[in-house]
Amino acid sequence: VKIGIIGAGNMGGGLGTIWAGKGHRVMFAARDQQAAESLAKTVGPNAQSGTTVEAAAFGEAVLLAVPWASVPEAIADAGRLDGKILIDCSMPLTPDYMALVVGHTSSGAEEVQRLAPGARVVRAFNTVPAQVISTSPEFGSENATVFYCGDDSEAKSVVKGLIEDIGCDPIDAGPLQNARLVEPMTELLIQLAFVQGMGANVAYRLLRR
Ligand SMILES: NC(=O)c1ccc[n+]([C@@H]2O[C@H](COP(=O)([O-])OP(=O)(O)OC[C@H]3O[C@@H](n4cnc5c(N)ncnc54)[C@H](OP(=O)(O)O)[C@@H]3O)[C@@H](O)[C@H]2O)c1
């Protein structure tokens, strides 16, 4: 899959590095283009860098991995997203990460869908910390669950494969509206990690039988 990555920080950099290693082609974009370029050089031949509009045009799938305050600008800069699989891992958080700014009656992912009405938005990767992605998704014999939700089944099946590529267990959490339920799980994880003192190497695992 060709993947445009808007936001080349902890999440975008971590996911893009693994996807490139799995044979996908990635293009990193950030406002600091030199940082994106040096990341691409470090990642190797499957990675390149470009502007936000270039990364969006490049990707069959586009990962949105910028802080919440940057989401409107990043989507505007991305230009035409009609028909693109837009993977939203951004989280609608206050600047100190201690609370959600959207919930119950909407979600960050639904707000992203409103900003990019033609895109096939899939909410994913927000319940797994960047630290887990960059170290290992495996905890003993189990691996971390990644919930994903969206309204386009083809887009969801591509994202399911990209979740498997990072070694996580994909769980289809239903339509995009269920992002209202998944996003608070991220804030719980943040509270457990940084307020309750568990640290950032924590992840969810759904048990089934
Ligand atoms: N870190 C986690 O564990 C985690 C987990 C789940 C979800 N998330 C969510 O994922 C998103 C990214 O988090 P992160 O930890 O990766 O953040 P980060 O390390 O601060 O990286 C953010 C990236 O976005 C770029 N950026 C910011 N504004 C931009 C714009 N307008 N256009 C293009 N690029 C822009 C930044 O580079 P420039 O400043 O140079 O543009 C940087 O490369 C956030 O919404 C966060 O809530 C994070």
Image (tube, rainbow, N blue to C red):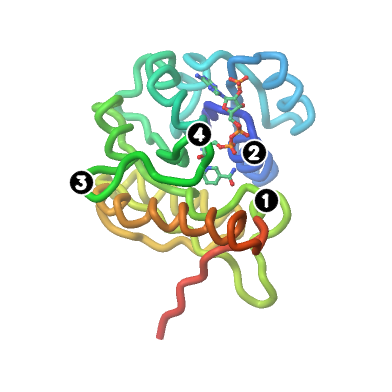
- Label 4 to label 3: alpha-carbon separation: 21 Å
Residue 178 position in % (x across, y down): 28, 54
Disc 4 designates what residue?
A: 95
Question: Tag 1, which secondary structure?
Answer: helix
Residue 174 to residue 154: above or below: below
Amino acid beneath label 2: Asn
User: What is the three-letter code of the residue carrying label 4?
Assistant: Pro
Q: Which residue is mark 2?
A: 10
In the image, what residue occupies the spot 43% across and 58% down?
Answer: 185
Ranked by sequence position, the earlier of labels 3 and 2 is 2
Question: Looking at mark 2, is its residue's CB closer than 8 Å to ligand 1?
Answer: yes
Q: Amino acid at mark 3?
A: Thr
Task: Name the residue nearer the viewer: 134 or 185.
Answer: 185
The residue drawn where x is 52% and y is 58% is: 189
Q: Which residue is mark 1?
A: 131
Can you tell me whether the CB of the residue at mark 1 lies under 8 Å from the nearest atom of ligand 1? yes
Q: CA distance from mark 3 to mark 1?
A: 30 Å
Give the mark, 2 or 1, whose residue is nearer the N terminus. Answer: 2
Along the viewing direction, whichever of 200 and 3 lies nearer the viewer: 200
Q: Nearer the viewer, mark 3 or mark 1?
A: 3
Would you call the spot at circle 1 few (<14 residues within 10 Å), some (14-19), or many (20 or more)? some
The x and y percentages for residue 93 are 44, 39
Q: Ligand 1: which quarter?
A: top right
Mark 2–mark 1 contact, CB under 8 Å? yes
Dot 4 falls on a residue whose secondary structure is loop
Residues under labels 3 and 2: Cα distance?
A: 29 Å
